[in-house]
Amino acid sequence: MNVDDDLNPMNFSFLIQKREITRAEGQGRIPQSAIRNPQSELRTAFTLIELLVVIAIIGLLAGLILGTASIASAKKTQTRVSAERDALVTTIESYKKDKGYYPPDNTNDPTCIQTPLFYELTGMTVTPGANGPGSFQSPVSGETLTTAQVGGLFPGISGFMNASGDPSSPAKDYYAGLKATQHLLVVGTTPQGSVNFTVLGVPASGPTNINPAIVGGGNPINPWHYNYSHPTNNPNSYDLWMDVKYSGKTYRFSNWSTDPQVIGP
């Protein structure tokens, strides 16, 4: 113990206490363990500054975790939509290879959403009517459309190119790997759109998400836009695109750009 320590009031008090207790101990009255050293009683509580530092570190770690989770979620969405776009492009090209032309679209729908693309790629079964095809049934969605309903949904079209009424030679399903989450029965949006129809899409957030036509009929879907009659980006084939929102921005996935393009907030 140095001189400064001796001047410390706590140490001075301790020395007096120890001297008195030592004298008493020599007389066999007080055990050495009874001596209290104020400096040996270490504090166990946090100071306010220490608590603030701990809270700041926890907040920093939470921010890093949330940021990493957000990046992972965005990457997952981008990967999924890109993969489904590529699969749909491949399916459309297979249809074109077999038939020599691309599936028809709907020139009366400026959004390019209400098109017969689903029916053409998956095939339809024809039920004969009195004066020709009476109705068309989808083996994939199970829905049935009359000739009049087809014309109402897709003006200028009275039937489907990929359809067959011969059980021994059914229409070809070009999209054999189509999942239930990739199509949805929705309400038509054209003036004659009181009829439900099935649209192809992805269950990803976007500015044009569509709710199912039937309550409890599934989750909203982000539809694919298909333009074959007057494409602006692929004048020799067709335009296919979808707008998806993630990471605070809206991205366009299309068949004229490999990478998604930022088109807005």
Image: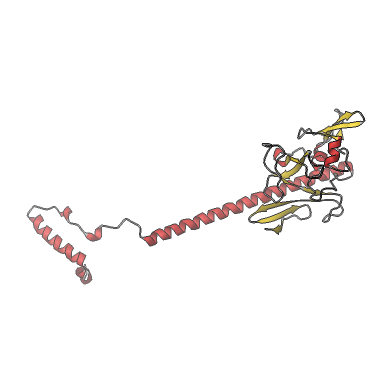
Image spot of residue 73 (x, y percent): 62, 50
Viewer-closest of 68 and 133 = 133
Image spot of residue 254 (x, y percent): 76, 52
Q: Residue furthest left?
A: 27
Residue drawn at 76 percent across, 35 percent down: 141
In the image: residue 84, left or right of residue 19? right
Viewer-closest of 162 and 174 = 162
User: Which quadrant of the figure has residue 131?
Assistant: top right
Q: Is residue 15 above or below residue 34?
A: below
Q: Is residue 98 above or below residue 230?
A: above
Viewer-closest of 92 and 159 = 159
Viewer-closest of 149 and 184 = 149
User: Which quadrant of the figure has residue 147?
Assistant: top right
Image spot of residue 23 (x, y percent): 9, 59
Count the numbered circles shown: 0
Residue drawn at 68 percent across, 51 percent down: 78
Image spot of residue 20 (x, y percent): 11, 60
In the image: residue 98, left or right of residue 244? right
Looking at the picture, the colour scheme in use is secondary structure
Q: Quadrant of the N terminus?
A: bottom left
Q: Quadrant of the C terminus?
A: bottom right
Residue drawn at 70 percent across, 55 percent down: 251
Q: Residue furthest right?
A: 131
